[in-house]
């Protein structure tokens, strides 16, 4: 079992237990509001994520080596797609996988927006907690999309968290599309690596948290009517 897989299962196991906790004393960064629906304890950085690789560690070097190899091997067309993906952090990225224009489905869009907003809040708090430098800040010679944000916000990946939480939600609403939508989320997360703005471990950290968060929201009794309304849209021919 690889180190990234081990990190995913550590995160997933912690979340499975932590999601039973009652919201309590974990405070957000001054600029970051707490999630509206998710438990601040269950999705606090020290519960929802394994720590990122330490600067200068073997794990960080392996992370960076994989990233360099991936970028060097990626064709120009795939790099262009990665750049496009980075500029489109919204549910439309799943239109092809779902076989519909999601913008025409108001209840589904409302649920996806709710999920995305709460997951974004969890990610923002974690980014300020872990303060990991982006790969191109560690290796200035690393090609990356755009100018790149010179900020300590690499871990976890916000784009990947959005993709996995949206994919999990859509798969629950329309199980026949689950394989396609999960494949799109995985590919979208890979785009963040191809863009050189996230390490593989940043993307994988988001996978465990985002799927757990989406499942917690989908099964929250307070949101039952919204989930039911979105499911009803997919039951229609």
Image: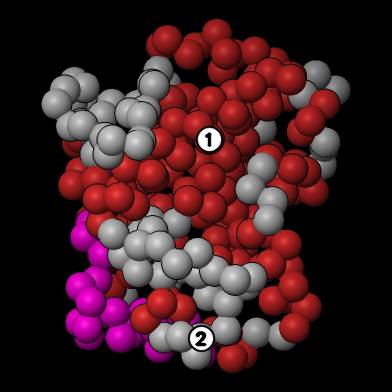
State yes or no: residue 51 in magenta.
yes
Q: Is residue 10 visible?
A: yes
Q: Residues within 10 Å of mark 2 (few under 14, many from 20)?
A: some
Q: Is residue 190 visible?
A: no
First to last magenta residue range: 48-69
User: Badge 2 is on which residue?
Assistant: 142
Q: Nearer the viewer, residue 34 or 97?
A: 34
Q: Nearer the viewer, residue 144 or 116?
A: 144
Quadrant showing the C terminus: top right
User: Which secondary structure lies at badge 2?
Assistant: loop
Residue 68 to residue 41: above or below: below
- Identify the residue shown where x is 47% and y is 24%: 218
Q: Residues within 10 Å of mark 1 (few under 14, many from 20)?
A: many
User: Badge 1 is on which residue?
Assistant: 116
- Identify the residue shown where x is 65% and y is 84%: 74
Measured as percent of width and height from the top left, residue 223 is found at 48, 14
Residue that lies at the very extreme toward the left in this rendered image: 25
Task: Residue 204: name its quadrant.
Answer: bottom left
Task: Residue 63: name its quadrant.
Answer: bottom left
Task: Using residue 101 as the reference point, say whether residue 199 is left or right of it.
Answer: left
Residue 104 to residue 177: above or below: above
Question: How are the residues colored?
Answer: secondary structure
User: Which secondary structure lies at badge 1?
Assistant: helix
Do callouts 1 and 2 mark residues in contact (Cβ within 8 Å)?
no
- Identify the residue shown where x is 69% and y is 76%: 79
């Amino acid at each position: 079992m690889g180190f990234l897989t081990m990190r995913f299962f550590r995160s997933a196991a912690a979340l499975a237990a932590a999601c039973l906790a009652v919201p309590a004393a974990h405070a957000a960064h001054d600029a970051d509001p707490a999630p509206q629906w998710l438990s601040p304890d269950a999705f606090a950085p020290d519960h929802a994520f394994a720590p990122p690789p330490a600067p200068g560690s073997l794990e960080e070097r392996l992370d960076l080596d994989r990233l360099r190899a991936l970028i060097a091997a990626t064709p120009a067309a795939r790099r262009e797609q990665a750049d496009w993906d980075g500029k489109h952090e919204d549910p439309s990225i799943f239109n092809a996988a779902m076989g519909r224009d999601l913008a025409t489905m108001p209840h589904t869009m409302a649920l996806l927006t709710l999920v995305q907003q709460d997951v974004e809040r969890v990610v923002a708090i974690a980014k300020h907690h872990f303060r990991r430098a982006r790969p191109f800040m560690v290796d200035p010679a690393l090609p990356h999309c755009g100018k790149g944000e010179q900020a300590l916000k690499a871990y976890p990946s916000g784009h990947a968290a959005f993709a996995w939480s949206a994919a999990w939600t859509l798969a629950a609403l329309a199980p026949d599309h689950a394989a396609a939508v999960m494949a799109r989320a995985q590919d979208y997360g890979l785009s963040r690596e191809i863009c050189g703005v996230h390490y593989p471990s940043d993307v994988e950290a988001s996978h465990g948290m985002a799927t757990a968060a989406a499942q917690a929201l989908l099964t929250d009794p307070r949101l039952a009517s919204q989930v039911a309304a979105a499911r009803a849209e997919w039951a229609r021919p």
